[in-house]
Amino acid sequence: MRKYFEFDQLGTNYRTETVAGFTTFLAMAYILFVNPDMLATEGTGMDKDAVFVATALAAAVGTLVMGIFAKYPIALAPGMGLNAFFTYTVVLDHGIPWETALAGVFVSGIIFIILTLTGLREKVINAIPPVLKMAVGAGIGLFIAFIGFQKSNIIVADPSTIVALGDLTAGPTLLAVFGIIVTVILLTIGLKGGVFYGMIITAIVGMIFSQVPTPDGIVAPVPSMAPTFGAAFAHLGEVFTLEMLVVILTFLFVDFFDTAGTLVAVASKAGILKDNKLPRAGKALMSDSAATVVGATLGTSTTTSYVESATGVGAGGRSGFASVVTAILFILALFFSPLLGVVTSSVTAPALIIVGVLMASSLKDIPWDEFDIAVPAFLTVVTMPMTYSIATGIAVGFIFYPITMVAKGKAKEINPVMWFLFVIFILYLAFLN
């Protein structure tokens, strides 16, 4: 095993890789509770226990494939932002059944595999201007944070001003505020897994003050996955519409750049990049796309690479063995389903808000002094939370980019793919949104 994972070449060992795998798990374990809470939001009709199992298994399978096949210390799980898009835009806003939405995730994974095998993926990625990639990431961050503020009632609806500050003296809201403060402090002092520990502390304090139900137990048999397993297959025939085409394109687009950015960032931190290129990139991308197909089959939104893997790399992880350790921990987590009842919206909201902060960091790389670039970037970022739709934010940004570029006399710099998306998103806003 040492030889397979190239311990000697990478200068690592079993102990270091095990610690790294455990560290990565702690940094992203929050998804085990946040994802079921997100997808099983009232109105979607999804079973929370089944989504919990699907989340853990999708993370375990995806991470295991990444570790053994691609040999990278990178873990995977259902992606933040993509789960919000799945729930709030596709299911709740457009009224698409969750089964059909899962079918869309499944198809996007298949397309991802095809694009990876043919090499078209890189061409599509290169066609999208870097500024729009950064704007989409930041916009999703603001959208996720807004959801966190809303779910905790820190921000509430107001007939006069649309939104307003909620009652901060209400128990659940006050607990969420406490959770935000604790999580911020933990991350500020550099504690690995700060988001996860923040959720634990918030849940404990909530139980002490009777704001969170006390669980009947900690360990229990693995819940049934029957409500979600294979549901996508029966609805594959419903994805061949213009509306679902936009949904699938959005799943693809966000997963494209989540994966690319994460792979490069984590590989760079681990010192794996060679001549500024990613070794075994095809295997890493294939692992990611295969995980999406598996996740959709099990019953969860798009599974993607997690930038939290950098915490494991920071702890010394250099090989795929660290990912194997993380995958095993996700499998063990299946037996802790009773804790789902403890993780209320007040407990998950701080995680959503803090993850939003982390995702918004890409704003610093946008050249705001170039008006023709700033406009589509700004509209992408602000439209997502203001319209409560990731797809709409992407659409608006991708429509305005060619407009400002042509007006600036830069029409020749626009890739033909961008013109295709320009037309698609105009149709989307005109006839579907």
Image: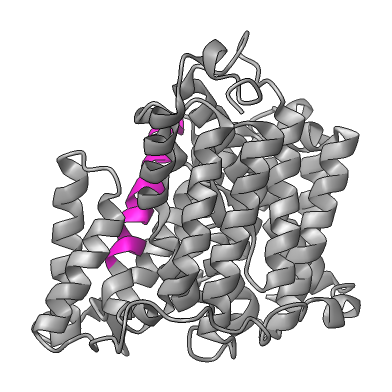
* Residue plotted at (70% across, 57% down): 292
The rendered magenta stretch, by its main secondary structure, is classed as helix
Compared with residue 203, is residue 111 higher up or lower down, i.e. above or below?
Answer: above
Q: Nearer the viewer, residue 241 or 83?
A: 83
Does residue 316 appear left or right of residue 301 in this picture?
left
* Residue plotted at (74% across, 34% down): 283
Please provide the residue range marked out in magenta: 350-369
Does residue 168 appear left or right of residue 116 in this picture?
left
Instruction: State the image quarter where residue 341 is shown.
Output: bottom left
Q: Is residue 249 visible?
A: yes
Total numbered labels placed on residues in the image:
0
- Quadrant where the image shows the N terminus: top right
Residue 274, image x and y in percent?
62, 11
Residue found farthest to the front: 1
Compared with residue 222, is residue 143 higher up or lower down, i.e. above or below?
Answer: above
Residue 172, image x and y in percent?
19, 83
